[in-house]
Amino acid sequence: MSEQSQYVPPRVWKWEQPSGGAFASTNRPIAGPTHEKPLPVGQHPFQLYSLATPNGVKVTMMFEELLALGHQSAEYDAWLIRIADGDQFGSGFVEVNPNSKIPALLDHSTNPPTRVFESGSILLYLAEKFGEFLPSEHVARTETLNWLFWQMGSVPYLGGGFGHFYAYAPEKLEYPIDRYAMETKRQLDVLDRHLAENRYLAGDAYTIADMANWPWYGQLVLGRIYDAGEFLQVQEYANVQRWAREIDARPAVQRGRMVNRTFGEPEMQLHERHAADDFESRTQDKLADTGNE
């Protein structure tokens, strides 16, 4: 039995050192701002403060889909929040999201501006505001919300569970990796069985349920997060693969993936988005810092 398995929790836990691993420097047991930093404000009704993690991609997908439908009042500024640098603990960001997590949104079309935080809440807010991607019929609406909230409850086991211990923890530990790999595969099986009988998660219509789940589970089976496709044998989930590829082909999704992205292929990075033509002019080339994270 390994030394790690012999750990005995103290009677009272104390924060005495960073937890180790990726992002350890930003983890702490208290909330609130660490420094004064007001948020920038652009010219559009919606001000998004985010990073292209799966949770951030949900919202930029939604905005780009709304704009593709012709909703010009859905124009938005997307400001880069570098979580590795602790931008989420700036005073301005904490005012918008006291939980200090991306994404966070301010809707300046209301007076005073409305703050919206938590990615699922933002998707629901925009769907109701624009009357898109959320069915009005009772059964279809309820099914959409079922899968939206399924994602909210399930993905911490994929991200904070499997993703952390498999990809980011300072050392590989068998028990948590096995535990969360099992749960991740169970969740993929839930999706695969459902998608065997449904084109999209809520049926025949593409909805915010798909936008919530695709950046996590879709990109997982497409091999884009955690580099764990072979480990998890994601090719087994043929229906999830079909669903993931179909959504991946949508132009609005391709644009949404780029926004606030500072890593990966340079051609897929758009550090900030302030206008539709930024996708062609590549805003990130105008920024002082063009290095990948």
Image (spheres, rainbow, N blue to C red):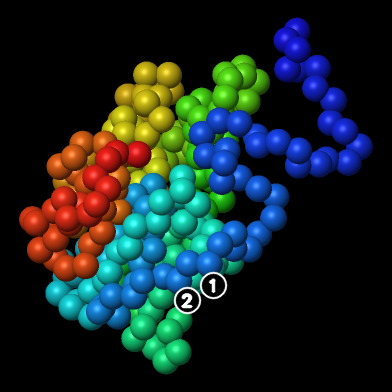
From the image, tell me which residue sits under label 2.
115
Q: Is residue 91 above or below residue 270?
A: below
Which residue is drawn at the image coordinates 69% and 55% (left, top)?
30
Image quarter of the C terminus: top left
Q: Amino acid at mark 2?
A: Arg
Q: Please report contact status of discs 2 and 1: CB closer than 8 Å, yes or no.
A: yes
Q: Can you tell which quarter of the image residue 12 is in? A: top right
Q: Secondary structure at mark 2?
A: strand
Residue 281: where, in percent of width, then height? 9, 56
Q: Nearer the viewer, residue 172 or 86?
A: 86
Which residue is drawn at the image coordinates 40% and 56% (left, top)?
81
Image quarter of the N terminus: top right
- Badge 2, how many Cα within 10 Å: few under 14, some, many 20+? some
- Image check: 236 left or right of 184? left
- Is residue 108 something one can see in this rendering? yes
- Image check: 15 left or right of 51? right
Q: Amino acid at mark 1?
A: Glu
Frontmost of labels 2 and 1 is 1
Q: Residue furthest top?
A: 1
- Image check: 252 left or right of 35? left
Residue 203: where, in percent of width, then height? 33, 55
Residue 172's disc number: none
- Badge 1, how many Cα within 10 Å: few under 14, some, many 20+? some
From the image, tell me which residue sits under label 1.
95
Which residue is drawn at the image coordinates 40% and 43% (left, top)?
216
Disc 2 to disc 1, how far (Cα)? 9 Å
